[in-house]
Amino acid sequence: MPELTPPDPPLSRGRVLIRPPGNGDVDAITAACQDPDIVRFTRIPTPYTRERGQKFVEECREGWKQGRSANFVGIDLHNGMLLGSIGLVIDEGAAAAEIGYWVVPDARGSGVATTMGWLVATYGFEAVGLKRITLEAAITNEASNRLAERLGFTREGVMRSAWFDGEAGDTKAPRVDAHLWSLLPGELHEPDAEDREEE
């Protein structure tokens, strides 16, 4: 796959800036990935060590170079603090990608996830040329399902017993259904000042 070029200058809206993660983000990423809800609703490995955080940054760098993924961290322009992480896993042959994200606890309910999602989806459609973006969310993950609706995704169906409702790889955790959402060019909703969520 051709190399992807990160946006230059980085993309931003309001107080939120997104850029590829770097070595200076490792400690903040590692700290964020101790949060129980991030562990529960994403596929991050556990335990999440600093070495794993460093590996994540390196994998992101390689993903950009190989054109396989476009991963970003969200940064608060007011104070430089990490707000979250969001990215696209790209299927070049299908001109499609899956979007995934997490937000630090202190930033939830502030519209951060909606803003990051809008920025990344816009980048995917306009810069990468994607024709379809999907999002998977466990039915128990109410915040991600609301986020998909706000951004203009269409719920295509239910994937039965698709997620563990617990730590990644914990086969004793209950399995739950997941909603499959999709977004096509022209369907993305721009967030407004009233957008708030509980990511």
Image (cartoon, grey):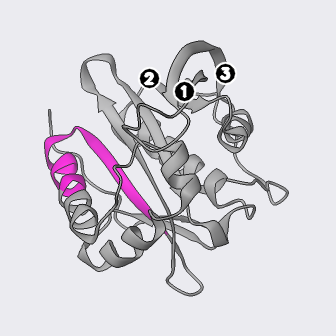
Q: Quadrant of the N terminus?
A: top left
Q: Does the image show residue 136?
A: yes
Instruction: List the single residue furthest toward the front.
Output: 172
Q: Which residue is mark 1?
A: 185
Front-most of residues 114 and 7? 114
Q: CA distance from mark 3 to mark 1?
A: 12 Å
Q: Which residue is mark 2?
A: 131
Q: Residues within 10 Å of mark 1 (few under 14, many from 20)?
A: some
The amino acid sitting under disc 3 is: Thr
Image disc number at residue 195:
none
Q: Position of residue 44 (x, y in %)?
A: 38, 49
Vertical placement of 168 versus 197: above or below? above
Q: Which residue is mark 3?
A: 154
Front-most of residues 193 and 102? 102
Q: CA distance from mark 2 to mark 3?
A: 14 Å
Whether residue 6 appears in magenta in the rendering, the answer is no
Q: Which residues are magenta?
A: 59-74
Front-most of residues 8 and 92? 92
Name the residue rendered at 66%, 39% in the picture: 141
